[in-house]
Image: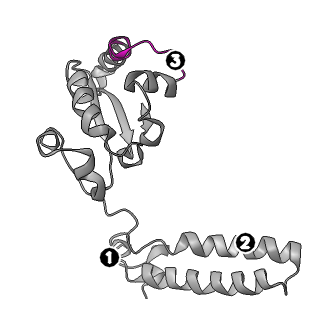
Amino acid sequence: MFLAGAQLGQGNLWASIADQLGLPAVGADVLLLAMDAAGEAATTAGSRFLIVLDALNETVPADFWRVHLPALRSAVAQYPHVALVVSCRDTYRDLVLDGAESSHFLQRTHPGFADRRLDVPGIFALIYGVIEGGQQGWTSPQALVALPLAALVLTGFVLVERRSPSLGRRCNAHGTRPSCRLRH
């Protein structure tokens, strides 16, 4: 079950979870019993029911999880076929978790899109330039700025990707895969 942190933080946590699931406010015990039963049914495959809370840092108020996460974790721990997974930007970790609570979680850091997101603005500029060029004319200021900007940013994206160590791992020993051709 995937829950967005931005959709939580107002009122009762379990009522908010039920609302995100399109259910009436049935309470923690009813929800967790149903999740546990679903997880138990999946145990033949070695699985558990996952409650995935994404982007705790987007919850308002920002310190909501300092109070509610320990209670949620404790409630989930009572059900052997249910597991809790949370994500939070590392810059908000201390706001979301106090020191004692963080010891209850296995923590992993994901680099996200650090220094590697030139493709998104490049594609945006390209699409914007084509749309505006078609509507306003190809010599309109919007098209004359957006299209060369797209070319510049997408060229930067290709150059960054060519130096990416992850690109090399996708190549075979002979360099014959299409992704390898950028390196040679």
Residue 46 in view, yes or no: no
Q: Name the residue under label 3.
A: 23
Residue 149 belongs to magenta span: no
Q: Mark 1 points at which residue?
A: 165
Give the residue type that dot 2 points to: Tyr
Instruction: Pinpoint residue 87: horizontal percent, then vertical percent.
Output: 33, 46
Quick one: SS at disc 3? loop
Q: Which mark's residue is nearer the viewer, 3 or 1?
A: 3
Q: In this view, does 91 lie above or below 41?
A: below
Residue at 47% x, 83% y is 182
Instruction: Pinpoint residue 100: horizontal percent, then vertical percent.
Output: 11, 41
In the shown orientation, is residue 72 left or right of residue 58? left
Give the residue type that dot 3 points to: Leu
Q: Which mark's residue is nearer the viewer, 1 or 2?
A: 2
In the shown orientation, is residue 149 left or right of residue 47? right
Separation (CA) of disc 3 from disc 2: 40 Å
Residue at 47% x, 71% y is 117
Name the quarter where the N terminus is drawn: top left
Earlier sequence position, callout 3 versus callout 2: 3
Instruction: Pinpoint residue 44: horizontal percent, then vertical percent.
Output: 28, 20
Quick one: SS at disc 2? helix
Marking on residue 111: none
Q: Name the residue under label 2.
A: 128
Give the residue type that dot 1 points to: Pro
Earlier sequence position, callout 1 versus callout 2: 2
Name the quarter where the C terminus is drawn: bottom left
Circle 3 packing at 10 Å, graded few (<14), some (14-19), many (20+), is few
Comparing 73 with 51, the one in front is 73
Earlier sequence position, callout 3 versus callout 1: 3
Residue 33 in view, yes or no: yes
Residues under numbered marks 3 and 2 in contact, where contact means CB atoms less than 8 Å apart: no
Q: What are the residue bounds of the magenta stretch?
A: 22-33
